[in-house]
Image: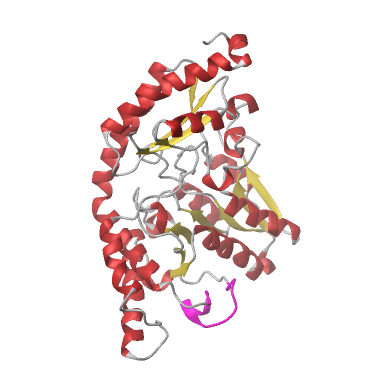
Amino acid sequence: MKSVYMDHSATTPVDARVFEAMIPYLTSEFGNPSSIHSKGQKARQAVETGREQIAALINADPREIIFTSGGTEADNQAIITYALNNSQKGKHLITSAIEHHAVLDSFHYLQGLGFDVTFLPVNAQGMVEAETLAKAIRPDTILVSVMHANNEIGTIQPIEELAAISHEAGAVFHTDAVQTIGKIPIDVRKMGIDMLSASSHKLHGPKGIGCLYVKKGVRIKNLFHGGGQESRLRAGTENVPGIVGFGKAAEIAGQEMHKRAEHLNRLGQRLREGIVNSIPNTIVTGHPEMRVPGSVSVCFEFVEGESILLMLDSYGIMASSGSACTSGALEPSHVLLAIGLPHEIAHGSLRLTLGKDNTQEDVDYVLEVLPRIIANLRHMSPLAGRGGSQ
């Protein structure tokens, strides 16, 4: 049976070149980077090389990169510790209604500590409009956090404009860039980003390693207490193999970004148009142009997303109905509800996210199988007869 992986927003396979770079630090070069002997110092050099490679990808100073266990930890540290460390300036915080739960739950936690949080609505394409932020921001706003691109519908936010509005009001701007780093250009200086969260396993690096960019002068605190690693902002022995892999993945992504984006945009357009043209009553979600390369998000009327995924998997096609972190939830996606879709349509969501190794043959196979699956599911659905689609 053919195997087609189209869930790259959930995770990506480790690039062979990345794995090769990691091997010595999983075997012979096992030193602790805090040790002063030669093996420890070789590990330290590897950590700093990885830091430099990641910093180069986003135009940061390497000293502004703090290694974490992933995007969730980076989001938590940026949001929670900045708010707690700067509460004397104000206790109003702003984020969007479509953030990843690592961000949303951090803000909910801060609400429980007495902070006032505004959750910005988005338009029908999943974009935070600048005017909406400008109206919500207040003199006591200290932090604004808006994701660079949504993990479910792929919409890219106007980060530079949102950051400028935040700075004009005296607030610090954070973005969760887990879905965009290595996929589209990021320049933290040009875009006015003060803090940025990223994760290795979304750009063909290993799992269990991420980072937080913190602009010099922005005051945060550590989440973990212990040693003095990462400039005393992240206690614990550094994950040397993971950092090496993250750094190598970042370096390769920077070199191949343009070529990958062209490939993914071409395949994504073919897949999106093929679905719309072959399956009636399909709703495409997300911005038509400002979207992550290779991101295809649709909703099918009269069917359940979970049933679609199970049927696709039986044909060897791996996809999702939204964020992998909420795949067990019975409620429809908060993102789809936020863009105005009713519950019954949001339940029929499908997210297909392509990667650098997907081919036109993969796309054509999905376009061969998916219309039959939707037709069969609609045939069994009592709702389909009411809508008159099939």
Give whichever of 62, 190 is nearer the camera. 62
In this picture, which residue range is highlighted in magenta? 221-235
**Is 234 a magenta residue?**
yes
Give the left or right position of residue 357, taking residue 94 as reference. Answer: left
Name above or below for residue 58 compared with residue 81: above
The residue located at (34%, 62%) in the rendering is 59
Q: Is residue 271 visible?
A: yes
How far across and down, in percent of the image, does residue 46 sit? 32, 75
Query: Hey, which quadrant is residue 91 in on the image?
Result: bottom right
Residue that lies at the very extreme toward the front in this rendered image: 1
Residue that lies at the very extreme toward the bottom in this rendered image: 37
**Is 206 a magenta residue?**
no
Give whichever of 190, 382 is nearer the camera. 382
How far across and down, in percent of the image, does residue 355 sit? 34, 43
Query: Hey, which quadrant is residue 78 in on the image?
Result: bottom right
Name above or below for residue 321 compared with residue 274: below
The residue located at (53%, 83%) in the rendering is 227
How far across and down, in percent of the image, does residue 241 sit? 37, 70
Query: Hey, which quadrant is residue 345 in on the image?
Result: top right
- Where, quadrant-wise, is the N terminus in this rendering? top left
Q: Is residue 193 visible?
A: no
